[in-house]
Image (tube, coloured by chain):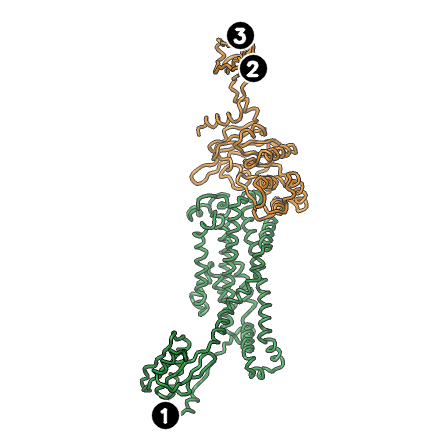
Chain colours: A orange, B green
Amino acid sequence: MNILETNRLVKRYAGHTALQDVSIAVPEGQIYGLLGPNGAGKTSLIRIITQITAPDEGTVRFMNEPLAPVHYQKIGYLPEERGLYRKSKVGEQLMYLARLRGMSESEARRRIRAWLERLNLMDWATKNVEDLSKGMQQKVQFIATVVHQPPLIILDEPFSGFDPVNSNLIRDEILELRRQGSTIIFSTHRMDTVEELCDYVGLINRSRKVLEGKKKDIKNAYKTHTFIVETDAPIALTENGYEVLQSESTEEGIYRHLVKIRQGTNNGLLQACMAQSNVVSFREQIPDMHEIFIRVVAAHGN
Amino acid sequence: MNKIWLIVQREYLIRVRKKSFLIMSILGPILFGAIIFLPALITIFTSDEEKHIAIVDESGLFQDKFESNQSLIFSVVPINIEQAKTALKEKKYDGVLLIPDIDISNPQGFTYFSEESLAPMTKANLERTIRQEIEKLRMMRSGIKKEQLDGIRAKVDIITIKIGEEGEKAGSSGAAMVIGYVGAFFIYIFIFLYGSQIMRGVMEEKTNRIIEVLICSVRPFDLMMGKIIGIGAVALTQFLIWVVLSLGITTGISVVFGLDKVAEARAKGQMEQLQQNPEMANAVEISNAIDAIASINMPVTIAAFLFFFFAGYLMYGAMFAAIGAAVDNETDSQQFMLPITIPLIFAIISLSAVITNPNGQLAFWLSVVPLTAPVVMMARVPFTGANWELFLSMGILIASFIGMVWLAGRIYRVGILMYGKKPTYKEIGKWLFYKA
């Protein structure tokens, strides 16, 4: 089931179109990576989903209802440009934000305490935000995003500004939230996090959605049937179906070939190689998200 | 509604807890008191310095005519003008007035010698004395006797009576003027003081980048109204503290000046006795002023003050919020402040004209224009009381602040997400029609 569906969203600003017929579907309980180059329209899309702005055309459905102000408290949003009141105390500030999202005071107090303990911030609860390091402020912002246990969490570049230790901490928290049933939309440029965390991927380029689906399926779709074959002797593939794209010999006396199968099967290629040498290794070259991203964006012209 | 309340609470508490709020609450009445009393105090202290003025009377007509007072001591000296000038240089006198041997039908040549210029008040005093004396001489010459002359003189003092529903009351346009001025001035000060707090608050949320976190939880309009109402509550609190403190101070002053004795004496019907006591003369005067204040329709004035205070604050507050949302920093805000500052300052400047003629055309039109109405109409209410002009002014103001809040809300929701370049008025105009 999809927790969120957008239908042909259009958003225009003076002089340019930020979104053109964008329809995405975010399945419940998954981590959805929203990708795209700078200025592609990701932030415009997120602002419509979070009801910060309204679309010029198109509709959004959330939990099978048309998106409305009652859904404010069911969504947690960590913007890319984020901040806190500098002169306010951490605890008070979290309480204010939690209450704004409809939590009762006692419930909010309990949850804030639990989160501060979890992220080792308990000693800082009564300090002003301006006394905190940047990393600690980021953690407070993360708590503010998830404290009201929203079914949908939207994170825009959540790892920017984190050191590797805190990055891991937050990543584990994100995975834990998914385990508890939350859906997470991730907007990022960092393909390694997409590779690592996302189950679904949607790619926006030049105001349009150009790709969407299960990460595994997309990767399969972008397979080029290219194999890396390592042998202990040179080989010559004479059959028409196989094309050697690249050949090199390594210092250890191993020959590495990049072979594309135009016609035929994996096993056929393997047999052809085996006939001429000992095969040391044989594996399919699977494109990573980085590669797919660049290929798709380039194909749509940028 | 619940969320607006949360925002109001927060905006109120963070400001009231600040040290600066406490300091302002205490210093405010003292500062205002100082502004009012300082000129009086300065006069008292500087007038202690006596000035000796020598009068060289060559005509011999002005022997005992100049009356000395606390600060000016006149003495007709039996020396000629050259000697007097030397004495002036030796600093025996502060000034020398030369009255030449004049022809009564054409008096000319009165001259004042001094090292510093003559104060206008003193000059008027001298001229009046000389003129009266010459007039007297001329009248006596034409055959009028001194007794007749004394009989001709009349002293006139107009007592104003306002005819109202509760019958006739002794009124005082002086008291109405003071109350009008003070009320209007308070409204002006509070709009500026707390309006700019709204602007800074909005700008802070924008530059802190917390705004995006907030408006995915609340509607921008709620956020704006919460801030305006919260800060308005701070203004009211501050005002009430000032009123209470000022009342305390006034009571203190009353005790010092002996007003309580006046009240007591009145109760015992000993007023006449009191008036004969010169030490109590001041107290009687102040007590009379208080009576005059009581003659103004206070319930209407207070109600009008509260109304114009809030309606004016809401209207201008919404404008301040819109400006705060449209710009990124205080420097850029200057340009957009003009539409706020010009009408307000114009209203304050025109106050003296309005109060001199509270029922005139200028006064009427400035109370109809909503941007000047809070200040101008407030200044008029002590004179006019509740009449149709007051209700017209109020009605227009209510409509205007609703309209202004609506407009500001539309600018606000777009502006808070715009960073970078300072927008033009044209761009802000376009924001009004964006779909939110």
Residue B341, located in which quarter of the rendered image?
Answer: bottom left
- Image quadrant for the C terminus of chain A? top left
Q: Amino acid at mark 3?
A: Gln
Residue with the most extreme top position: A275
Q: Residue at left 41%, top 75%? A: B119
Q: Which residue is mark 3?
A: A276
Q: Is residue A4 above or below residue B409?
A: above
Question: Are the residues under marks 1 and 2 on the same chain?
Answer: no
Residue B133, located in which quarter of the rendered image?
Answer: bottom left
Do we see residue A297 in this rendering? Answer: yes
Secondary structure type for disc 2: strand
Name the foreground residue: B287 vs B62. Answer: B62
Name the foreground residue: B89 vs B222. Answer: B89
Q: Amino acid at mark 1?
A: Gly
Q: Is residue A253 above or below residue A199?
A: above
Mark 3 closeness class: few <14, some 14–19, many ≥20 residues within 10 Å: some
Name the foreground residue: B24 vs B90. Answer: B90
Q: Is residue B176 above or below residue A27?
A: below
Q: Which mark is residue B143?
A: 1
- Image quadrant for the N terminus of chain A? top right
Disc with the residue nearer the chain's start (2 vs 3):
3
